[in-house]
Structures are given as C-alpha cells and as structure tokens.
Image (tube, rainbow, N blue to C red):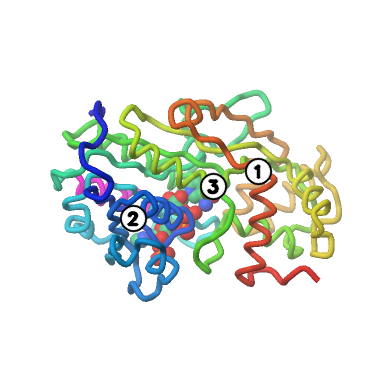
Amino acid sequence: MRLTTLKNTTNEETTVCITGASGFIASHAVKQLLEKGYKVKGTVRGDASKYPYLTELPGASERLELVQANLLTEGAFDKVVEGCEFVLHTASPYIVNVKDPQTELVDPAVKGTTNVLKSCAKANSVKRVVLTSSVAAITDEPSNDKVFTESDWNTLSSLKRNPYYYSKAQAEQSAWDFVNNQKAGFDLVVINPFVVIGPSLGPALNESNKIFKDMLSGAYPTIMSLHWGIVDVRDVATAHVLAMETASASGRYLVSNEVMKMTDVVALLKANGFSKYNLPKVNLACKTGDKVMKALSYTQPKGSGTYLRSHLGRKMQYDNSKVKQDLGIQFIAAKDSIIETINDLIKWDHLPAKS
Ligand code: NAP
C-alpha cells in the first residue's frame, strides 16, 4: 500500500507512536515531533519518572505520554498504537558483544518488529510505519569496488558472524514480508542509518558514541584501516519525521553522510585539542597492519572480532542521494558531529574534562 495524500489532520490532532522512546535516536525524534506540535505516545521499559530528559522537553507535559511495553510481550503494543496515525518503530537492542545472540539480539529485533506490526494492523488508525533499520541490513562487508545503495541486502551475517547486523537484516526483512504478504492496511518506510553519533539527550552511553569514548580512552591501541559512515543523530531523527510526513516517501533510505577513515578521525581529534587523551598511537592502517589486527581479532569478544575481520582494509562506499532528493535532508558535517560528540561525552562524564 502506498500513501497518496498527506494526513488530513493538523499536527495537533495527529498522534504519533514511537517505540523505544528512551533511546539515543528516538529521544531526538520525540523532541522534534513535540516541536512540530504532534501528540506523542512513547513506549519505554521503565517507569516514566526514569526519563526526565523526555518528560521535561518543551511540550511534553501537554502532549507526551509514556507507556510501558516490552518488544517480546505479545500484544503489548495493541493499546498503545490504537488511535495513532503514524508509528515510528525504533526499539531494538543495539549491542555488539552479547553472550546469546538469538535471545539478546535476534528475538527482540525480529519478534519485536512483527509484534509491533501486528498491533498496527489491528488498529485501523495507522497509515504508515517508519522502521529504524540500519546499514547493517545493507551489508556487513564494505568493498573497495562497490558503491552500496538501498537495493543491496546483507546476506552474509549470521548468529556467529556480526550477529547485531544479522538481527537488523532479519528484522527489516520480516517487516517487508509482513507488509507485502498481509493486508496490513498501512505502508512501510525504512530508515537505514550508518554510525549515528552526536549529542545525547539522556545520560546513557550509546554504542556508536562509545566508539569515540573508546578512541580517547586507550581502548584502541592502534589506528586501524577502518572506515565509518558518519551521520548525526539529529539528522537521523529528522529523516524519521520527514519519512513519516512525506506522502511520496517510499522504500528504504540509506541515511549517512561522509565516510571517514580512522586515520583522519584521529588527526581531527589531535587538531582540535584532544591530544592529551589516550588516543591510539601506533599507525597500523596498512596491509601488514590488517594482517596483524585480523590475527589479534580472535582475542577480542566475538562481536568485535567478527566486525574487525569483515571490515579491516575495506573502504565503505555508498550512495546517499535518495534521502537527499526525496526528503531534502542536508547533513550536518561529520567533522562537526564528531567534535560535538566528544564535548557531549565530557558533559555526561563519559570522558574526563580536557585538562
Ligand atoms: P539505544 O539508545 O540503545 O536505543 C534502543 C532502544 O530500544 C531503547 O529505547 C531500548 O530501551 C529499546 N529496547 C531494547 N530492547 C527492548 C525490548 N526488549 N523491549 C522494549 N524496548 C527495547 O540505541 P539507538 O542507537 O538509539 O538505536 C535505536 C535504533 O536505531 C535501533 O533499532 C538500532 O538498531 C538502530 N540503529 C542505530 C545506529 C547507531 O549507530 N546508533 C545505527 C543504525 C541503526 P531501554 O532504554 O529500556 O534499553
């Protein structure tokens, strides 16, 4: 099903449900939805008092309702999505290293997605679901010879190889299967972001911002030939809101700005006064270094180990023109996002202040 007209209610009359409202990306989407005047129902796992960074947002006391729901509880979203025109399904575990990938990653991602979609199908009010997928559903193996687009699918990940990537590919596939095989009554638009960084509204340390905490705290002893597609969390939130509001939006949207090499990220941090932190010192971003790091990757936790083996020495290249053209996204420069991220990590005490 494709939407042909925009909603015919005002924002003030429109209720948007967002799952995992407490999350790094979702909390920015909540903020933007409230700024635009929408009524927002956010699902969380804890008591509403745990989320002052949501309940104290401008407009929240009048238009934000937080409801408890767990992805794995059958029917948990039935009541929540009732009366909502749009559902942004962002909740999913984002953890690289887990003990049991099936129960900790794949079940909440896949069963959670179908659980939410079943509830949307039962409620006659839902017109569109915007699903937060990932570039992880596009590939887990960058290539020096290929430019990835929305038409690519990650078919390599498994419970043993990059299980987080596997959970995202499986969850997105199950969402497309659901809307294509059933009379869902709503359409689906998917957002596929890459490494999402930027200021956090809440105190939790997100897995992607943690890359920068680790880089400044000595967790990376060497510079490796890794490439990251960087996108600011505020742009990802905007992409969700625009994907919801733009009637002609359709399919998948690869949402990422520039690719940066780890070598260039370290140089950027040095040039911006972060040299006193414990930055990686030895440069192993070369073919011999790749061999050394691949051998050492077997000493790492499984999730990080498979990530290193599938990414070292491979340049990530992708085409982000669809989201710019269809949704008019103008990305925040990656360098600005990185510096803001570090300052935000300091603000939340994830890193010591610059001395
Ligand atoms: P996050 O801050 O960890 O948010 C994840 C959210 O999912 C949290 O609100 C969490 O609730 C919720 N959640 C996890 N398991 C749940 C369960 N069993 N039941 C109900 N809620 C559950 O991570 P994020 O980066 O904002 O991720 C949001 C989405 O973006 C995820 O789908 C992730 O895969 C995707 N994504 C993230 C990135 C990135 O670089 N950050 C890149 C691409 C895609 P609690 O607060 O209770 O834990």
Q: Residues within 10 Å of mark 3 (few under 14, many from 20)?
A: many
Q: Position of residue 133 (x, y in %)?
A: 43, 43
The residue that label 3 is drawn on is 162
* Gap between marks 1 and 2 measured at Cα: 27 Å
| Horizontal side, residue 263 vs residue 338: left or right | right
Numbered disc 3: secondary structure: loop
Numbered disc 1: secondary structure: helix
Q: Which residue sits at x=22%, y=32%?
A: 181
Q: Position of residue 60 (x, y in %)?
A: 34, 63
N-term-proximal mark, 2 vs 3: 2
Amino acid type, residue under disc 2 in the picture: Thr
Marks 1 and 3 in Cβ contact (< 8 Å)? no
The correct choice, above or below, for 93 with respect to 321 in the image is: below
Snapshot quadrant of residue 148? top right
Q: Is 1 or 95 nearer to us in this picture?
A: 1
Q: Which residues are magenta?
A: 107-120
Predominant SS along the magenta part? helix
Q: Is residue 312 visible?
A: yes
Looking at the rendered image, the disc whose residue lies closer to the viewer, 2 or 3, is 2
Looking at the rendered image, the disc whose residue lies closer to the viewer, 1 or 2, is 1
Q: Is 128 or 115 nearer to us in this picture?
A: 128
Tell me if the residue at label 1 has its CB under 8 Å from ligand 1. no
Q: Position of residue 144 (x, y in %)?
A: 68, 28
N-term-proximal mark, 1 vs 3: 3
Amino acid type, residue under disc 1 in the picture: Ala
